[in-house]
Structure formats: C-alpha cells, structure tokens
Image (cartoon, rainbow, N blue to C red):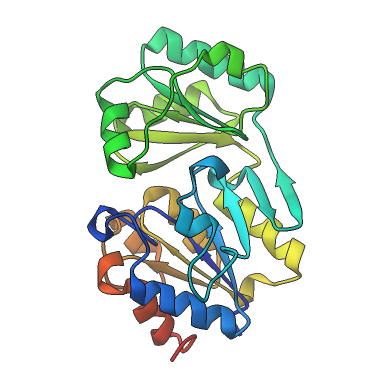
Amino acid sequence: MIKAAFFDIDGTLLSPETDRVIPQGTKDALVELRRRGVKCIICTGRPRAQLPWCIRDGFSGFEGGFDSYITMTGSLCYDADGVYADTPIDHEVSSRFIELARRGGFDILVLNREGSFASGHGRGMLDLEEMVAFKYPEADIRELAKKPIYQFCAFVPPEQDDDLRRAMPDCIITRWCDIFCDIVPSNSSKPAGIKAALAHYGISRDETIAFGDGGNDVTMLQYVRIGVAMGNGNPETKRVADYVTDDVQNDGIPKALRRFDLID
C-alpha cells in the first residue's frame, strides 16, 4: 500500500509548457491522493524561498500546500511542525568550492535558508532564469559563506562534471539540465531526504512512489518502491524508472497514479 508520494517540481509538477503552474488534472489527482490518506511530499533542488505559490500554499481542495518539503536536493527537510533534517555543507568544503569557482571563472548559485544568490549573470545564469521565471539576486559569495550553505549550482558543461568530482570528493554532483550541476554534501541527496521523511512519518520504502524528470531524480526513482519518469524526462531518468508516463502537460502524473490504482 502506498502511503507517501514524492514529487520533483520543475519538469514534473510544472514546466514552461504549463505556464509554470500545476495543470488542473494534476491538481485534481493530488486532491484525491491526499483524500486517500497518501502523504504528498515535495522533493526538489529548489530552496524554500524559491517555491512557487501553488507549491508553497496549495490550491482549492489542497489548502496548506504539500504535507512536507525536501528542499535543496535533500539538504533541508521540513513540514508544518518544523525542520526534521538539516544537512549544510561543511564550512571548509564551501570555502574550497568558492575558491575553485573563482579560479575556474564560472558562475555559481549559493543556496541557503534565505534563498538562492548568484555570483554573476553569464549566459547560463540568464538561461536558467528564463527557464524557471525567477531572477537570482547577486551577492558577495564570501559573505554568504559565513552562514550555512546547503547547495551550490555550478554553471559548467556536463563534460566538466568529473573534474568537479575529483576536486570535491566530499560532495555529490548531480545534474538536472546541461546548463548547470548541483553540488550537495556527500551525506545529503534526494534519497537521503526521502529516508529522513520516512523516518519522520514512520513509513517504509515499500510504501512509496516518486515522480521525476531530470538527472538529479535518478537516485530518487531508484530508492522508492515505484519510480515514475515523466514523458518529457531525460533518457537516463527513463532508463531507471519502473514506469514512464506521459508529459507533465498531458496529465502524466494522474495517468501514472491511475496506472497503479492510487486514484480513480
């Protein structure tokens, strides 16, 4: 019996093709899923401050938003009762990466509890802002490093990922798209966030389903009992999924929930 459903945001719950809002069919499915007693949990690379209103506050029939939020690729997890998993990057590791970015001359995003902050606005940063309809403020990165940092985004091409892994062996490098990669502490990840949520609610892995579309969703889909890749997802995500559904804008989520008899 499924008791918890985990949802990525970008490319899964919403996308540019849906005008960056949750499609009505998916909203209806979430309402029914909650009515059946299934916990609906966000699992995203976004920080809390960057959650769209429909994700944060909910909508008609789904008031109060989702039951729980796994943010910054598993590094900060919370619900209405407070934070239940808090995994910032070690200060020495953060400082080392910031220096690496400075020497490498590439833009980065710094994600902390207050939001996402840019080191600069090169082409990649501008492209991302267009994709997610969000403007990242620039900030003094060294000043930000004085407080806990939960995730970095490095604006480098995929062929540089292995170089980053060698330079940052105490971090996990994942990628949602070709524009940038995510860098999180080695003891954090989407599966780590899911594990924390399951412990928090007393739910087992055998009672879980998850939906994702990008490379940073691969381990999440492998971790849960049923991993569902969106039709608009990348090839790697589809390869590891238990089931590939339709695109986000074509009711991919409700179609998969019906496929597994989780809604009517």
Q: Position of residue 89 (x, y in %)?
A: 64, 30
- 20 on left or right of 150: left
- Which part of the image, by quadrant, shows the N terminus? bottom right
Relative vertical location of residue 257 with respect to residue 82 in this rendering, above or below:
below
Residue ID at (32%, 54%): 20
- The answer to whether residue 244 is visible is no
Picture residue at 63% right of the left edge, 52% below the top: 193
Q: Quadrant of residue 154?
A: top left
Residue at the spot 69% in from the left edge and 39% down from the top edge: 87
Q: Residue furthest bottom?
A: 264
Task: Tell me residue 81's x, y (percent).
Answer: 76, 57
Residue visible at 36% across and 11% down in the picture: 105
Rendering coords of residue 239 (x, y %): 34, 62
Q: Is residue 32 above or below residue 130?
A: below
Q: Quadrant of the C terminus?
A: bottom left
Residue sticking out furthest to the front: 60
Horizontal side of residue 250 vs 42, given as left or right: left
Count of picture labels:
0
**Picture coordinates of residue 42, whole percent (x, y):** 54, 59
Residue 162 in sight in this render: yes
Answer with left or right where residue 65 lies relative to residue 247: right
Work out whether residue 91 or residue 131 is closer to the camera in this orientation and state it: 131
Residue located farthest toward the top when viewing the structure as drawn: 103
Above or below for 134 versus 142: below
